[in-house]
Every structure is written in C-alpha cells, then in structure tokens.
Amino acid sequence: MRPVLAVALAVALASRAGADEDVGSYAGTLGTRPALSGDWNGHRTHLAERGVTFDLSLTQIAQGIVRGGKDTGWAYGGRGDVVVGADTEKLGWWRGGRLSLEFEGSFASDVNKQTGALNAVNSSQTYPVTDGYGVSELMLTQLFFRKLGVVVGKVQTGSDSNEFAAGKGDAQFFNLALQFNSAATVTIPYSALGVGVFWLPTGDEKFAKLKLFVVDSNGKGDSPGFDTVFNGETTYHAEGRVRTLISGLTGHQLIGGAYSTKSFTALEQNVRVVIEDRSLQKTKGSWVLYYNFDQYLYEPERGSGRGLGVFGRFGVSDGNPNPTKYFYSAGIGGKGVVPGRPLDGFGIGYYYVTVGHPVFTGPFASASLLRDEQGVEAYYDVAITPWARLAPDLQVVKPAQKRTVGTNQGGVVGGGVKPINTATVLGIRLRLII
C-alpha cells in the first residue's frame, strides 16, 4: 500500500491552483464529519478543490451459517479500499482527463464456500480476490468535445449500476446476486488490462452513457496482467444506461452484453467456486446478455439520492461453460426515508438462478450435482455517524450444490456424500469511511 499512496501523494502535491468549486468539506466534529480522519488540517478539502480526492474505507463482516449449508459456524473477515482520483484540468495539466487508482484487499475468512451456493453471501470478501490484495484499477479517462471519451489501463468493466442494488458488499446488500447480474461473472473479468470508448449523448453522464470495452479475458484483480494480455483471449463488453422520469420520479434502464473468446471450464472464473473437484470439460467461448432497472416510487427531492423504490435484473448466458443459464432478481430499497435518520438505508431482495449444468469428466461424468439456486436477503444500514455504518443482515439461500462431492477408494461417486440443505445466514457489517 505504501508505494500506491506515495504515487498518489506525489500527484496531489504537484497540483497547481485550479478553479475553486464547492466540493463539500471534510471538516467537523468527530460525530458530524463525513470521514473519520477528518480534513487533515485543511489539506483534504484543499486538494479536492484542485481535483485530487482520496476515498478510504474499511469494511468488516462477521457472518455465520446457523442452519443448513455444508456446515454451520461463524467467520470474520474484512476488506480495505483506497481510491484516488486526479482531475487533470483542475491540476492545470490538460483538459478533459482523469486519472484513477484503486487499491483493495480482503483478509481473514468468510462462509462463502460453506453455503454450497454459486453466489457469495459475503461478496465484500471476494474483491479483488478472496484473501488477497492488488491494484484493481489504474486508468486514464480522456473526454473529447464533452461527449466522446476513451479509457485505457487496468479497468473494472462490469459496472451494472443500480440505485438500490449495487456496490461491493460494503454498502447495500451483502450477496453478490443482489449487487450484480451473476450471469456475467464467468464472461466478464472483474479487473483487466484493456481499452474502452464511451459516448454521452447529452454531455451529462448522469442522463445517459454508452460504452464499449475490449479487455484481457484472463485479467485478475491481484496481478498486473501483462503476462496474459497478448495471449489472444479477449472479452468484448458493451453497456448502455439511461435515466428516465416516470410521473416525475427518477429511474434508470440498463442493458449490456459481453462475449469472450477464452476456453473456459464452467466455474474457473467464478470466485464463488463450490464444487470441490474441478474435473470440468473445457468449452470455447462464452456470452451473456443482461438488463436491470431501478425506479423511485417516493422521492422527496429529485436527484437527492433519498427515497423509496424498486429494482430488478434479468440475465441470460450460454449455460455452458457459464453455470448460470438464466438469472432473475427483484426487490425494494430505501435511503433516508426513516424520520430523523437521513443516512440510514435498507433493502429486501430475492434472486433465482436457473443452472445450466456443466459437463463433468472422470468419476463425476454422470453425476447430477447442481440444481437451480434461489435466495432472499434483508438488511438495515444504521448510520451511527456519517463515517460509521452498522448493518445487520439476514439471508436464506437454497444453494445450487445439492450434495457434497466425494469418492470411495474405487473412484466411484458416493464416498463421503451428504445432502446440502437450505442455508440460513446471519451477519453484521461495520463500515468505516476513513
């Protein structure tokens, strides 16, 4: 982390005076400031006014399977995140540019593999990889004529933004299936070297944005990627999102798709692997199409981020190598609607995965190990202070894996096999904005 912060600080200290604008203040008492570490004696706000921002957070989750799954028990883990941004125009360098860097890492443990589910019940623990760290984003974004832009570097391509169901498990839902369309987890790498173009039809990114990325299919969040970028396995990813107004209330519509030329086994890219033996048949290429929407039903002030609304997602893939053939999710979410609690949030969501059964080899060739997966989650995020958020969470998941995998001495399926029942998972999350 030290070299990353040193580079970011060098950028900040090299800044020249730019046009001042209201970017908000980090000042205040311990109970009212937006970040735990405050304003750094005035330097943090000063840097933000000149285009250099630092967003630091630490998310800790204690979570336990109290019934069902492969096994009951509790685990504790966490994730640290450092995001640095630099606006080249405000720095006095050139117009329309932005440099961004994200360094993140997870530590300790989780119960993800103990549920038997394809989707992580603690997705925060999977970024950038399970129990690891790395620079998951280091890129230059350049805007031309206020509408056309290019992106180059190590990028995070799978945004799938949603007002009430997004993030990385550090805010809103814990479960991956209620933050992202899990039909895309095999085809689209989380972080990879690549290039992209985007178009803002009105010049306002909040109104509409169309983008196309070409990235290395083998990219990983914990490695630079130069050893695989020229291997010829490429992912092409396109996505468009537009803001809508229905009866004067804000909503969004998003559609996207991707195709990869990589030769996959069905679960190798999915960090939520639940099959103990990876004797899966290779398949060339993978594709996915996905859609999501969000719509406010109650919005006291347009664009404020406060209100109550609904969301939904749908995805379809090749089904092999992708284990998720069809994906559905829906739910409700709210932010700042409880009287006297302007920073609190809550959500209730449901998801369903139609599994496209992968082809096994060896002793598992004729085994039926997977079934359709579904789950429900409810959380309430309490703002203890603006920088400290505590969220209790409940999940009930019927996992895709039907039983544990085992073989006897003759290599025949059956040794050590036991059924995997619906898992009840309790959790609590503490997020500190530093």
Image (cartoon, rainbow, N blue to C red):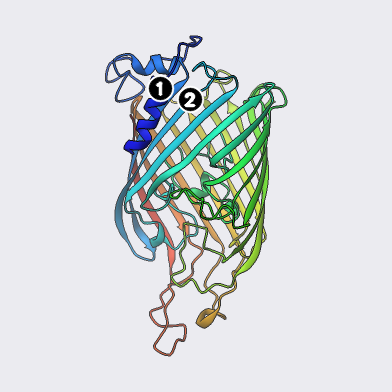
Per the image, the residue denoted by label 1 is 12
Residue found 46% across the figure and 38% down from its top: 172
Task: Please state if 198 lies on the left or on the right of 13 as rendered.
Answer: right
Asked if the residue under mark 1 is in contact with the one under mark 2, i.e. CB atoms within 8 Å, the reply is: yes
**Label 1: element kind:** helix
Q: Amino acid at mark 1?
A: Ala
Asked whether the viewer can see residue 168, the reply is: no
Image position of 175 with respect to 364: above or below: above
Image position of 206 with respect to 154: above or below: above
- Of all residues shown, which one is farthest toward the bottom? 410
Residue found 66% across the figure and 61% down from its top: 285
Task: Please state if 59 lies on the left or on the right of 137 as rendered.
Answer: left
Task: Please state if 45 lies on the left or on the right of 266 as rendered.
Answer: left
Q: Amino acid at mark 2?
A: Ala
Asked whether the viewer can see residue 108, the reply is: yes
Tell me where residue 142 appears, x and y as whole percent. 61, 28
Q: How packed is label 1: few (under 14 Cα within 10 Å), some, or many (20 or more)?
A: many
Residue found 39% across the figure and 16% down from its top: 45
Per the image, the residue denoted by label 2 is 86
**What distance separates the C-alpha of mark 2 from that of mark 1?**
8 Å
